Image (cartoon, rainbow, N blue to C red):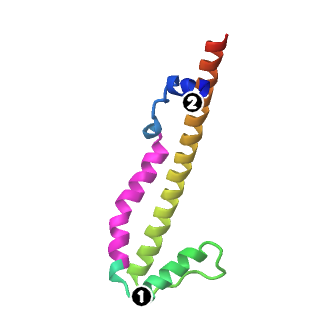
Amino acid sequence: MEVQQATEQAEVPKDDTLDNPELNKAAYIFKTGMPRIKALAKNLSGKGVARVFNAIIEFPFSETTPRFKNKAENELFVLTLNALGAKSIMSAAIMKHREEIEHEVVNEIISNKEDTNG
C-alpha cells in the first residue's frame, strides 16, 4: 500500500523529447519520406520490390553492390534506408526517454517514501 501511495504522489517528469534536434530531424525524414516510399513500392513490379527488399536486407553486408533495373528501384532503396535510419534514431530516443522517466519516477517514489518514514 505504501508503494501505491508513493507512486500516486510522484510527479511525472516533463516531456522534453521534442527539444532534441537529432530526433526532430529523424522524425521529419521519416514522415516526409513515407508517402514517396509507399508510392514507389506500389508502382513497382513484384520483382522490382523483391530486388529492393533483398538489397535492403543484405545492405551493407553484401559482397556485391545492389543493382537495380531503374531509377525508381534505386530511389526506393535510398529512401527506405533513410527511413530505417530515422526509425532507428527515433526508437533509441524513445527507449532512452522511457528509461529516464522510469529513473526519475523511481527516485521520486524513494524520496516520497523516505519523507513519510523519516
Choose between 109 and 24: the one closer to the eye: 109
State the image coordinates of residue 69 (x, y, percent, origin top left): 44, 88
Residue located at (44% from left, 89% from top): 47
> Where are the magenta residues, as a range?
20-41
Q: Which mark is residue 54?
A: none
Look at the image and tell me in which quarter the C terminus lies: top right
Marks 1/2: CA–CA distance: 49 Å
Where the N terminus falls, by quadrant?
top right
Mark nearest the camera among 1 and 2 is 2
x, y percent for residue 74 = 44, 78
Q: Residues within 10 Å of mark 2 (few under 14, many from 20)?
A: some
- Local packing at callout 1 (Cα closer than 10 Å; few below 14, some 14-19, many 20+) is few
Point 38% across, 70% down: residue: 37
**Disc 1 marks which residue?**
46
Closer to the camera in the image, 68 or 20 = 20
Name the element at disc 2.
helix
Location of residue 8 in the rendering, given as x and y in whole percent from the top left corner: 50, 26
SS state under label 1: helix
Q: Using residue 7 as the reference point, say whether residue 15 is left or right of it.
A: left
The residue at the far front in this view is 1
Give the numbered dot on residue 105.
Answer: 2
Which SS does the magenta portion mostly show? helix
Q: Earlier in the sequence, mark 1 or mark 2?
A: 1
Residue kind at label 1, given as amino acid type? Gly
Residue 30 falls within the magenta-colored stretch: yes
Q: Amino acid at mark 2?
A: Val
Residue 41 position within the rendered picture, expressed as x and y whole percent measured from the top left: 38, 77
Q: Residue at x 53, y 46 (%)?
A: 93
86 in relation to 15, above or below: below
